[in-house]
Amino acid sequence: MAGINEFREQRLKKMDALIEKGIDPYPYRFDITHTTKELLENQDILIKDKTNIATAGRIMLMRRQGKTTFIKIKDRKGIIQLYLSINILKDDYENVKLLDIGDIIGVKGEIFITHRGETTVAVNELTMLSKSLLPLPEKYHGIQDIELKYRKRHLDLIMNDETKNLFIRRRDIIRFIRNYLDAIDFVEVETPVLQPKYGGAFARPFNTHHNTLDMLLYLRISDELYLKRLIVGGLERVYEIARDFRNEGIDKTHNPEFTMIEIYQAYADYNDMMNLVQDMVQKMAIDIIGTTKINYKGEDIELGGEWERIDYYDALEKYTSANIKEMEIKELKTFCENHKIDIEGKIGRGKIIDEIFKVMVEKNIKNPTFVMNQPKEISPLAKLHRDDKSKVERFELLILGIEYANAFSELNNPLEQRERFEYQMTLRKEGEMEIQEIDEDYLEAMEYGMPPTGGIGIGIDRLVMLLTGSDTIKDVILFPLLKSK
RNA sequence: GCGCUGAUAGCUCAACUAGGUAGAGCAACGGAUUCUUAAUCCGUAGGUCGAGGGUUCGAUUCCCUCUCAGCGCACCA
């Protein structure tokens, strides 16, 4: 007796016993007067007035000692101890024997303080709110198995307060962003997740199919092209907190579905986007964790002050000691060979240069840094740099080698946009993966005229990781994708 | 996709080095206990040792394949 099925059997028997006594093991509602936290906060007055309170929660711990039982119940705010005594409950004390750890109960009673000094509810009325049929993980160690945490997040949340608190902080971060943008007159919008053409990023999509339209659809890899249509439409300041989907590998900073905020502001350029993201993240850090000095992955990071800005090609030269910018494709390939950089499947000068950047530069950047003015070949949606037409007005925000944001002065010349797309198509013909088809509807929208616009995308999951000290994205996503067992 | 590591009771972990079909704590069940604090005390039960195959008289242990996970690499705006 005590394999998993035996546990269930035992608890089912207790449930039958409840039913026999006319007690519904799954009743409809229960009114509470205080959360556990409110009981503790207001204990002085509650004790003084002998208030009959009502509260509810899940049984986490039970100490039976004959005619007295101590129970700890947990609600969303905290934990409180209950004192159940045959002196108070009389005949109903029998029902205490039908309780199990994991059951959800409601209680009424008065607050008192035990001899050992713990604030406790002396229960005078006990109500079963939900009978639990399966045993919870062990009370002291909780869940240690990391796979179990992700697969059975409900158990993780019951057992580990840190997990619950982390997701509350995630909520706080997203709420901060909304408040910040709403206060400067941005409009939050929703755009299609199901897209007939995918674009706005380089990535492989998830394909799906609409039955009655008999139509191939993609789960969006980005919402950029839709948001810019809204800029054409005159909304001028828009943002979307979007779930994006990319059909690619999974690692500490990549989940196939993830949350990105994209922000577009008319009459602004990438300099404005730098100011916006810097100010927003700094104020967010103060608001959420109370400081701009953080320690992440063992490194001290200062989020305050003016963030460093470095030109993409200058950074390349600094960390490769080579003049990458002036190299022909042939020289670049030789350089990659010499430095053991794999450029299999990379077509075109820009992609090769970017691979060198990823391998040799990114990991060296620790403090928040705007890497600016990327090559135009890898930035088809960005405006050419006003002083150097070989590069674009774009930046990526890097912290500890991880990319947190990507922004441009948005390309709004429809003719040039078409040329850029067509260049991408030539790369695709040469075998480059991850190039989307030309989006004619988007180009047409551009032809009606889009104001000069600054746009930025910020990875929300990574930002949450940074501000909560999580070293894997799975820890900041409630249900990360795992293989089915 | 490649490499390394791991998977033992509901949970947290032992045993396996040198092959003889597994132990503890918590949880559970029975009993004692009317202010406990990871309550305590006495007793009981609980395991296809991740799955499949091989070697062997005999495999949780050795070998092979597979599954899942973690880490690293690769991929990845």
Image (tube, helix red, strand yellow):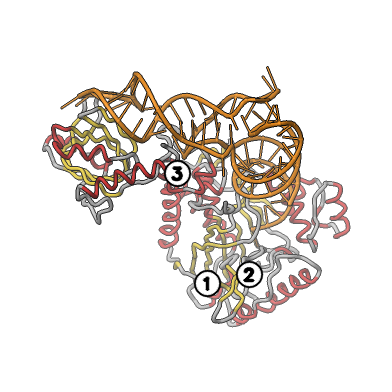
Q: Is residue A88 visible?
A: yes
Q: Tell me if A136 is positioned left or right of A84 in this view.
A: right
Q: Tell me if A367 is positioned left or right of A284 in this view.
A: right
- Badge 3 element: helix
Cα separation, mark 2 vs mark 1, equals 12 Å
Q: Label 2 belongs to which residue?
A: A199
Q: Nearer the viewer, residue A310 or B3?
A: B3
Eyeballing the image, is A42 above or below A240?
above
Please state, as top left, top right, bottom left or bottom right, where the N terminus of chain A lies in the image.
Answer: top left
At label 3, which amino acid type do we have? Asp
On the image, the x and y values in percent for residue A363 come to 68, 44
Cα separation, mark 3 vs mark 1, equals 33 Å
Eyeballing the image, is A256 above or below A82?
below
On the image, the x and y values in percent for residue A468 come to 49, 44
Chain letter belonging to callout 2 = A
Nearer-N-terminus badge (2/3): 3
Q: Nearer the viewer, residue A444 or A278?
A: A444
Q: Determine crowd level at label 3: few under 14, some 14-19, many 20+ residues with C-alpha closer than 10 A.
A: many
Q: Label 1 belongs to which residue?
A: A192
